[in-house]
Amino acid sequence: MKRYIIKRIVQMIPVLILVSIFSFMIIHFAPGDPLNMYIRPDMTQQEINELRVDLGLDGTIVEQYFAWLKNVCKGNFGNSLINHQPVASQIFSKLPATILLMGTSFVLSVLVAIPLGLWSGMKKNKMTDQVISILAYIGISIPAFWLGLMLIIVFALNLHWLPSNGMRTVGVKSVFDVAKHLILPGIVLSIGNMSVFTRYIRSNTISQLEEEYVLTARSKGITERKIMLKHVLKNCLLPVITLAGMNLASLVTGSFIIESVFGWPGMGTLGMSAINSRDYPMIMAFTMLSCLILIIGNLIADSLYGIADPRIKQGGKKNW
Protein backbone atom coordinates (compact mmCIF):
# COMPACT_ATOMS: atom_id res chain seq x y z
CA MET A 1 0.00 0.00 0.00
CA LYS A 2 2.90 2.35 0.78
CA ARG A 3 4.36 1.89 -2.70
CA TYR A 4 0.94 2.43 -4.24
CA ILE A 5 0.56 5.81 -2.48
CA ILE A 6 4.13 6.86 -3.37
CA LYS A 7 3.43 6.03 -7.02
CA ARG A 8 0.32 8.23 -6.96
CA ILE A 9 2.28 11.10 -5.36
CA VAL A 10 4.95 10.89 -8.07
CA GLN A 11 2.21 11.05 -10.71
CA MET A 12 0.94 14.27 -9.12
CA ILE A 13 4.17 16.16 -9.79
CA PRO A 14 3.68 16.75 -13.58
CA VAL A 15 0.13 17.95 -12.95
CA LEU A 16 1.29 20.47 -10.33
CA ILE A 17 3.99 21.73 -12.70
CA LEU A 18 1.47 22.27 -15.51
CA VAL A 19 -0.92 24.06 -13.17
CA SER A 20 1.88 26.27 -11.84
CA ILE A 21 2.72 27.27 -15.43
CA PHE A 22 -0.93 28.03 -16.12
CA SER A 23 -1.24 30.07 -12.90
CA PHE A 24 1.91 32.01 -13.70
CA MET A 25 0.76 32.83 -17.23
CA ILE A 26 -2.48 34.38 -15.95
CA ILE A 27 -0.73 37.59 -15.01
CA HIS A 28 1.28 37.66 -18.25
CA PHE A 29 -1.76 37.14 -20.46
CA ALA A 30 -3.43 40.07 -18.74
CA PRO A 31 -3.56 43.28 -20.83
CA GLY A 32 -0.62 45.65 -20.35
CA ASP A 33 2.54 45.37 -18.29
CA PRO A 34 2.06 43.47 -15.00
CA LEU A 35 4.28 46.07 -13.35
CA ASN A 36 1.60 48.74 -13.93
CA MET A 37 -0.53 47.11 -11.23
CA TYR A 38 2.14 47.92 -8.62
CA ILE A 39 3.15 51.41 -9.73
CA ARG A 40 1.97 54.42 -7.71
CA PRO A 41 1.63 57.90 -9.28
CA ASP A 42 4.30 59.37 -6.97
CA MET A 43 7.00 56.82 -7.86
CA THR A 44 10.15 57.90 -9.72
CA GLN A 45 11.63 56.00 -12.66
CA GLN A 46 14.41 54.67 -10.45
CA GLU A 47 11.87 53.35 -7.94
CA ILE A 48 9.95 51.73 -10.79
CA ASN A 49 13.11 50.00 -12.04
CA GLU A 50 13.92 48.79 -8.53
CA LEU A 51 10.35 47.50 -8.16
CA ARG A 52 10.69 45.59 -11.43
CA VAL A 53 13.81 43.89 -10.09
CA ASP A 54 12.17 43.13 -6.72
CA LEU A 55 9.17 41.53 -8.43
CA GLY A 56 11.40 39.43 -10.69
CA LEU A 57 10.06 41.07 -13.86
CA ASP A 58 13.44 42.11 -15.23
CA GLY A 59 14.44 38.75 -16.74
CA THR A 60 13.06 36.46 -19.43
CA ILE A 61 9.70 34.81 -18.95
CA VAL A 62 11.43 31.55 -18.02
CA GLU A 63 13.55 33.30 -15.38
CA GLN A 64 10.46 35.07 -14.06
CA TYR A 65 8.58 31.78 -13.81
CA PHE A 66 11.29 30.03 -11.80
CA ALA A 67 11.68 33.06 -9.54
CA TRP A 68 7.91 33.05 -8.91
CA LEU A 69 7.87 29.27 -8.41
CA LYS A 70 10.69 29.56 -5.88
CA ASN A 71 8.64 32.04 -3.85
CA VAL A 72 5.54 29.85 -4.11
CA CYS A 73 7.46 26.87 -2.76
CA LYS A 74 8.32 29.05 0.23
CA GLY A 75 4.64 29.92 0.71
CA ASN A 76 5.04 33.45 -0.67
CA PHE A 77 2.33 34.27 -3.25
CA GLY A 78 3.04 37.99 -3.22
CA ASN A 79 0.82 40.82 -1.99
CA SER A 80 -2.76 41.60 -2.90
CA LEU A 81 -3.25 44.50 -5.31
CA ILE A 82 -6.29 45.66 -3.34
CA ASN A 83 -5.14 45.87 0.29
CA HIS A 84 -1.40 45.21 -0.24
CA GLN A 85 -1.48 42.45 2.40
CA PRO A 86 0.25 39.06 1.89
CA VAL A 87 -1.94 36.77 -0.22
CA ALA A 88 -1.01 33.61 1.69
CA SER A 89 -2.06 34.97 5.09
CA GLN A 90 -5.43 36.13 3.71
CA ILE A 91 -6.16 32.77 2.09
CA PHE A 92 -5.15 30.69 5.09
CA SER A 93 -7.29 32.87 7.36
CA LYS A 94 -10.32 32.00 5.18
CA LEU A 95 -9.40 28.36 4.56
CA PRO A 96 -10.91 26.86 7.78
CA ALA A 97 -14.36 28.27 6.98
CA THR A 98 -14.26 26.84 3.45
CA ILE A 99 -13.03 23.44 4.66
CA LEU A 100 -15.87 23.38 7.21
CA LEU A 101 -18.46 24.12 4.51
CA MET A 102 -16.97 21.68 1.97
CA GLY A 103 -16.53 18.92 4.55
CA THR A 104 -20.07 19.29 5.87
CA SER A 105 -21.64 19.25 2.41
CA PHE A 106 -19.55 16.25 1.35
CA VAL A 107 -20.41 14.20 4.43
CA LEU A 108 -24.08 15.15 4.09
CA SER A 109 -24.19 14.15 0.43
CA VAL A 110 -22.62 10.74 1.14
CA LEU A 111 -24.76 9.96 4.19
CA VAL A 112 -27.98 10.75 2.30
CA ALA A 113 -26.99 9.26 -1.07
CA ILE A 114 -26.03 5.81 0.26
CA PRO A 115 -29.42 4.82 1.73
CA LEU A 116 -31.35 6.52 -1.09
CA GLY A 117 -29.29 4.80 -3.79
CA LEU A 118 -29.54 1.37 -2.14
CA TRP A 119 -33.26 1.73 -1.55
CA SER A 120 -33.86 2.92 -5.10
CA GLY A 121 -31.85 0.01 -6.50
CA MET A 122 -33.74 -2.51 -4.37
CA LYS A 123 -37.09 -1.08 -5.55
CA LYS A 124 -36.15 -0.98 -9.23
CA ASN A 125 -38.93 0.44 -11.47
CA LYS A 126 -41.32 0.74 -8.52
CA MET A 127 -42.90 3.93 -7.23
CA THR A 128 -40.14 4.48 -4.66
CA ASP A 129 -37.46 4.17 -7.33
CA GLN A 130 -39.28 6.58 -9.63
CA VAL A 131 -39.71 9.21 -6.92
CA ILE A 132 -36.04 9.04 -5.88
CA SER A 133 -34.91 9.14 -9.51
CA ILE A 134 -37.03 12.22 -10.23
CA LEU A 135 -35.66 13.99 -7.15
CA ALA A 136 -32.11 13.07 -8.18
CA TYR A 137 -32.62 14.47 -11.68
CA ILE A 138 -34.02 17.68 -10.21
CA GLY A 139 -31.04 17.94 -7.85
CA ILE A 140 -28.61 17.54 -10.75
CA SER A 141 -30.41 20.11 -12.92
CA ILE A 142 -31.30 22.85 -10.45
CA PRO A 143 -28.90 25.86 -10.33
CA ALA A 144 -27.21 26.12 -6.94
CA PHE A 145 -27.46 29.91 -6.70
CA TRP A 146 -31.21 29.84 -7.46
CA LEU A 147 -31.80 27.13 -4.86
CA GLY A 148 -29.79 29.14 -2.34
CA LEU A 149 -31.89 32.24 -2.93
CA MET A 150 -35.13 30.26 -2.64
CA LEU A 151 -34.04 28.70 0.67
CA ILE A 152 -33.10 32.12 2.01
CA ILE A 153 -36.52 33.52 1.07
CA VAL A 154 -38.41 30.59 2.59
CA PHE A 155 -36.45 29.66 5.72
CA ALA A 156 -34.77 32.97 6.59
CA LEU A 157 -37.07 35.77 5.41
CA ASN A 158 -40.50 34.15 5.66
CA LEU A 159 -40.24 31.51 8.40
CA HIS A 160 -37.32 33.08 10.33
CA TRP A 161 -36.03 29.61 11.22
CA LEU A 162 -32.44 30.01 10.03
CA PRO A 163 -30.01 32.90 9.45
CA SER A 164 -29.61 34.11 5.88
CA ASN A 165 -25.90 34.97 5.79
CA GLY A 166 -22.61 34.94 7.61
CA MET A 167 -20.99 32.30 9.75
CA ARG A 168 -21.78 33.64 13.21
CA THR A 169 -24.27 35.94 14.86
CA VAL A 170 -22.65 39.14 16.12
CA GLY A 171 -21.73 38.74 19.76
CA VAL A 172 -22.51 35.01 19.83
CA LYS A 173 -19.69 32.46 19.99
CA SER A 174 -21.04 28.93 20.10
CA VAL A 175 -20.91 25.76 18.02
CA PHE A 176 -24.70 25.69 17.82
CA ASP A 177 -24.76 29.17 16.27
CA VAL A 178 -22.19 28.15 13.63
CA ALA A 179 -24.21 24.99 12.91
CA LYS A 180 -27.36 27.08 12.32
CA HIS A 181 -25.52 29.29 9.83
CA LEU A 182 -24.06 26.17 8.16
CA ILE A 183 -27.38 24.41 7.44
CA LEU A 184 -28.55 26.33 4.37
CA PRO A 185 -25.21 26.67 2.50
CA GLY A 186 -24.28 23.09 3.42
CA ILE A 187 -27.53 21.73 1.97
CA VAL A 188 -27.26 23.77 -1.23
CA LEU A 189 -23.64 22.78 -1.83
CA SER A 190 -24.38 19.08 -1.19
CA ILE A 191 -27.46 18.75 -3.44
CA GLY A 192 -25.53 18.29 -6.68
CA ASN A 193 -23.12 15.64 -5.42
CA MET A 194 -25.89 13.96 -3.44
CA SER A 195 -27.93 13.51 -6.60
CA VAL A 196 -24.99 12.20 -8.63
CA PHE A 197 -23.94 9.75 -5.90
CA THR A 198 -27.51 8.51 -5.55
CA ARG A 199 -27.74 7.73 -9.27
CA TYR A 200 -24.39 5.89 -9.26
CA ILE A 201 -25.23 3.85 -6.16
CA ARG A 202 -28.64 2.94 -7.61
CA SER A 203 -27.08 1.76 -10.87
CA ASN A 204 -24.40 -0.27 -9.08
CA THR A 205 -26.95 -1.76 -6.68
CA ILE A 206 -29.08 -3.02 -9.56
CA SER A 207 -26.06 -4.62 -11.26
CA GLN A 208 -24.76 -6.15 -8.02
CA LEU A 209 -28.13 -7.69 -7.15
CA GLU A 210 -27.92 -9.67 -10.37
CA GLU A 211 -24.52 -11.18 -9.48
CA GLU A 212 -24.17 -14.85 -8.55
CA TYR A 213 -22.84 -14.16 -5.05
CA VAL A 214 -26.15 -12.49 -4.16
CA LEU A 215 -28.12 -15.48 -5.42
CA THR A 216 -25.84 -17.79 -3.42
CA ALA A 217 -26.31 -15.73 -0.26
CA ARG A 218 -30.07 -15.79 -0.69
CA SER A 219 -30.04 -19.56 -1.18
CA LYS A 220 -28.20 -19.89 2.15
CA GLY A 221 -31.01 -18.04 3.89
CA ILE A 222 -29.09 -14.83 4.56
CA THR A 223 -31.46 -11.93 5.13
CA GLU A 224 -31.81 -9.22 2.50
CA ARG A 225 -30.56 -6.62 4.97
CA LYS A 226 -27.29 -8.47 5.61
CA ILE A 227 -26.78 -9.03 1.90
CA MET A 228 -27.18 -5.31 1.21
CA LEU A 229 -25.01 -4.07 4.08
CA LYS A 230 -22.22 -6.67 4.06
CA HIS A 231 -21.85 -7.45 0.36
CA VAL A 232 -23.69 -5.14 -2.03
CA LEU A 233 -22.84 -1.89 -0.23
CA LYS A 234 -19.08 -2.49 -0.35
CA ASN A 235 -19.07 -3.20 -4.08
CA CYS A 236 -21.36 -0.24 -4.76
CA LEU A 237 -19.07 2.20 -2.96
CA LEU A 238 -15.94 1.40 -4.99
CA PRO A 239 -16.76 3.58 -8.02
CA VAL A 240 -18.34 6.22 -5.76
CA ILE A 241 -15.02 6.66 -3.93
CA THR A 242 -13.31 7.63 -7.18
CA LEU A 243 -16.25 9.81 -8.19
CA ALA A 244 -16.14 11.60 -4.84
CA GLY A 245 -12.46 12.45 -5.34
CA MET A 246 -13.11 13.89 -8.77
CA ASN A 247 -16.13 15.84 -7.54
CA LEU A 248 -14.02 17.80 -5.07
CA ALA A 249 -13.48 20.20 -7.95
CA SER A 250 -17.21 20.96 -8.01
CA LEU A 251 -17.10 21.60 -4.26
CA VAL A 252 -14.24 24.07 -4.69
CA THR A 253 -15.85 25.95 -7.59
CA GLY A 254 -19.34 25.61 -6.09
CA SER A 255 -18.19 27.11 -2.81
CA PHE A 256 -17.30 30.33 -4.66
CA ILE A 257 -20.93 30.82 -5.67
CA ILE A 258 -22.53 29.49 -2.48
CA GLU A 259 -20.28 31.51 -0.18
CA SER A 260 -21.14 34.65 -2.16
CA VAL A 261 -24.89 33.95 -1.95
CA PHE A 262 -24.83 33.24 1.79
CA GLY A 263 -22.08 35.68 2.73
CA TRP A 264 -20.01 32.81 4.12
CA PRO A 265 -16.57 34.20 5.13
CA GLY A 266 -14.48 31.65 3.28
CA MET A 267 -12.17 31.41 0.29
CA GLY A 268 -15.06 31.69 -2.17
CA THR A 269 -15.96 35.20 -1.05
CA LEU A 270 -12.31 36.22 -1.17
CA GLY A 271 -11.90 34.61 -4.61
CA MET A 272 -14.95 36.32 -6.11
CA SER A 273 -13.70 39.65 -4.78
CA ALA A 274 -10.29 39.03 -6.37
CA ILE A 275 -11.87 38.15 -9.73
CA ASN A 276 -14.11 41.23 -9.74
CA SER A 277 -11.21 43.53 -8.85
CA ARG A 278 -8.65 41.72 -11.08
CA ASP A 279 -6.39 40.99 -8.15
CA TYR A 280 -4.02 38.77 -10.18
CA PRO A 281 -1.70 37.59 -7.36
CA MET A 282 -4.77 36.41 -5.43
CA ILE A 283 -6.22 34.71 -8.53
CA MET A 284 -2.92 32.94 -9.19
CA ALA A 285 -2.80 31.68 -5.61
CA PHE A 286 -6.41 30.48 -5.79
CA THR A 287 -5.70 28.56 -8.99
CA MET A 288 -2.79 26.77 -7.40
CA LEU A 289 -4.61 26.02 -4.16
CA SER A 290 -7.79 24.79 -5.89
CA CYS A 291 -5.75 22.40 -8.01
CA LEU A 292 -3.86 21.19 -4.94
CA ILE A 293 -7.14 20.46 -3.12
CA LEU A 294 -8.40 18.50 -6.12
CA ILE A 295 -5.18 16.50 -6.43
CA ILE A 296 -5.14 15.70 -2.71
CA GLY A 297 -8.77 14.62 -2.97
CA ASN A 298 -7.95 12.27 -5.82
CA LEU A 299 -4.98 10.90 -3.86
CA ILE A 300 -7.21 10.18 -0.87
CA ALA A 301 -9.79 8.57 -3.16
CA ASP A 302 -7.12 6.38 -4.78
CA SER A 303 -5.83 5.35 -1.36
CA LEU A 304 -9.32 4.47 -0.11
CA TYR A 305 -9.96 2.58 -3.33
CA GLY A 306 -6.80 0.58 -2.74
CA ILE A 307 -7.88 -0.21 0.81
CA ALA A 308 -11.37 -1.25 -0.29
CA ASP A 309 -10.17 -3.39 -3.21
CA PRO A 310 -7.03 -5.47 -2.47
CA ARG A 311 -6.57 -6.22 -6.17
CA ILE A 312 -5.56 -2.60 -6.75
CA LYS A 313 -2.88 -2.81 -4.05
CA GLN A 314 -1.51 -5.99 -5.58
CA GLY A 315 -1.48 -4.42 -9.01
CA GLY A 316 0.30 -1.37 -7.64
CA LYS A 317 3.06 -3.56 -6.16
CA LYS A 318 3.59 -5.44 -9.38
CA ASN A 319 3.81 -2.33 -11.47
CA TRP A 320 6.15 -0.47 -9.13
Image: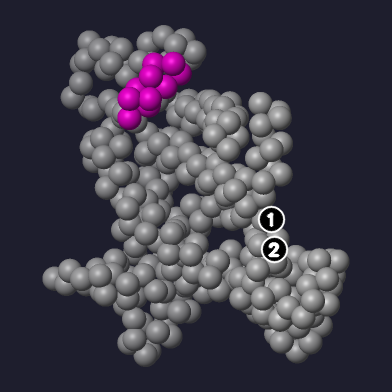
User: Quick check: 180 above or below 26?
Assistant: below
Q: Which residues are magenta?
A: 65-75
Residue 238 point in image, percent of width and height:
67, 56
Q: Are marks 2 and 1 in contact (CB under 8 Å)?
A: yes
Residue 284 point in image, percent of width and height:
43, 35
Q: Is residue 69 magenta?
A: yes
Structural crowding at the residue carrying mark 1, measured as other residues with C-alpha within 10 Å and reported as few (<14), some (14–19) or many (≥20): some
Q: Nearer the viewer, residue 130 or 208?
A: 208
Let me know if residue 143 appears in the view: no
Q: Amino acid at mark 1?
A: Pro
Distance, label 2 to label 1, CA atoms, is 7 Å
Residue identifier under label 1? 239
Q: Nearer the viewer, residue 122 or 194?
A: 122
Q: Residue at x 66, y 26 (%)?
A: 320
Q: Residue at x 37, y 38 (%)?
A: 282
Q: Residue at x 51, y 56 (%)?
A: 251
Residue identifier under label 2? 236
State the SS at label 1. helix
